[in-house]
Image (spheres, rainbow, N blue to C red):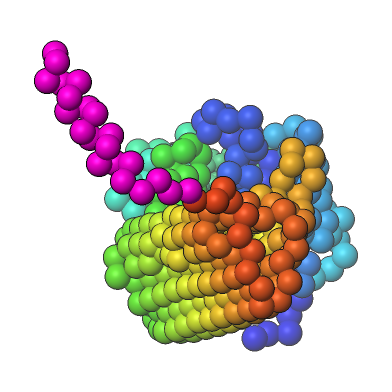
Amino acid sequence: MTDRTFLAIVLAAGEGTRMRSTTPKVLHEIAARPMVAHVLATARAAGATAIAAVVGPNADAVAKVATKAGADEIFVQADRLGTAHAVLRAREAIARGVDDVVVLYGDTPLVEAATIGRVRARLATGADVVVLGFETDAPTGYGRLLTEGERLVAIREEKDATDAEKAVRLCNSGIMGLSGEAALSLLEAIGAANAKGEYYLTDAVEIAVARGLEAAAVIGDEEEFLGVNDRVQLARCEAVFQTRRREAAMRAGVTLIAPETVVFAADTVIEADVTIEPNVVFGPGVRVASGARIRAFSHLEGASVGEGATVGPFARLRPGAELGRDVHVGNFVEIKNGKVAEGAKVNHLTYIGDATIGPKANIGAGTITCNYDGFGKYLTEIGAGAFVGSNSSLVAPVKIGDGAYVGSGSVITKDVPADSLAVARGKQSMIEGWATKFRARMAKLREKR
Ligand code: UD1
Ligand code: CA
């Protein structure tokens, strides 16, 4: 990597009307992470030494998310007067002095750090303006890159282009690098004499060329520059992200039996030699350790799965579920805020909420921890090697001691000492021969009819 300083400016002031949403566009999520947070993470991964985000008026929510995702400074663009106007809101940050400035869009979430690295590399070899372009068969709506041989001479916006210029298939992704030295003076020279009456960032190219500075294009892959203006494009970006993520997981040693059916969150961590069966969904905050198997149709969120554990099919791990090594969590089991220690089994039809389960404990089918009384949440503690019989209700707060047994169908409201048996259900009563007599009586009644 280079030791050049790098200011990333992320434009996030768009209105996003076509999303038809009360949520600002850049807060819509790709892989359970707001779009703008993807861009900020990428900027950081590309080596940004400072990140400025430009947000619209009344965009406190965007500012908050951007700050949490790593923006050092937030600037507000009160009137949307164009991309150059937006970049100039961050004047203060640019004026501090920096080697590389790169402008990114908050609604273009798939750009990769390596691609930004290529823009910076071109700045480092002396270019003053570097534009990331791509070839496309559908150029309508994009600014066209006008070149003379190797040199980039201008960018023409669709609305200002002649027919000959419209025929150009080399388009502007919107991502632009500027040398820190020239940036402010180029941006300040941009006017609004064009079809839209906006301050076009793209005009920086022509201005640089007129001044005898060097402008260059770096070409990337169209897919990486997919922007989001509506929910159809949001879904398209999601699909691209998921495809990349699945491939990365498989290359890192994770088996995906039907990769196209597994949905990752941006922060999912899966170690090598994990197998993921079809139709598994990862929400944010999941870690899965080596050797684990996540069986079909499971949903995990805010959970960690220990080495060699198995989860599902049809299991739900909610925030705070922590499974130790070799734990088994089976079908139709839900675990929320529950620590399940090494080798314990919770195999069928169970709800574990606000609980700790000791090593090698066995939780029978249909066990429910009754953790909530409508006001507070209470803890259930189950000891090492304890055995909870099927269809038991454990009414928290309550403790089941190490090695204790709970008889099936019990409603446990008092602590159970270690190595004892608790049975809390109606006693079984028997009447010998009752069924024989009953059937005889019924047969007689039928004859009479
Ligand atoms: C822009 C480029 C175009 C490029 C295209 C790629 C200009 C003049 N044109 O066009 O060459 O092909 O992106 O998608 O730069 N924004 C603000 N404040 C503003 C205006 C825009 O923050 O005042 C933000 C938007 O939220 C968006 C981005 O800048 O994230 C691009 O703005 P948009 O108006 O969509 O530009 P395009 O017309 O698509
Ligand atoms: Ca756009």
Q: Residue at x 60, y 79 (%)?
A: 385
The answer, for residue 327, to whether it is visible in the render is yes
Q: Is residue 445 magenta?
A: yes
Decide if residue 204 is on the left or right side of residue 77. Answer: left
Ligand 1, seen in the image, is in the quarter at: top right
User: In which quadrant is the C terminus drawn?
Assistant: top left
Q: Quadrant of residue 46?
A: bottom right
Visible in this render: residue 168?
A: no
Q: Is residue 449 left or right of residue 375?
A: left
Which residue is drawn at the image coordinates 74% and 42% (left, top)?
Answer: 373
In the image, taking residue 200 as reference, residue 147 lies left or right, namely: left
Residue 297 to residue 385: above or below: above
Left or right placement of residue 227 versus residue 81 in this view? left
State the image coordinates of residue 242 (x, y, percent, origin top left). Answer: 42, 60
Residue 2: image location, x then y, percent: 68, 85
Q: Please tell me whether residue 39 is drawn above or below residue 196 in the rendered image.
A: below
Whole-percent x and y of residue 293? 41, 75
Q: Nearest the camera: 67 or 98? A: 67
Which quarter of the figure has residue 212?
bottom right
Q: Nearer the viewer, residue 388 or 135?
A: 388
Span of residues in magenta: 429-449
Residue at image location 75% in from the left, 63% down from the top = 415
Name the residue located 75 percent from the left edge and 32 percent from the top edge. Answer: 79
Name the one closer to the observer, 203 or 385.
385
Q: Is residue 437 magenta?
A: yes
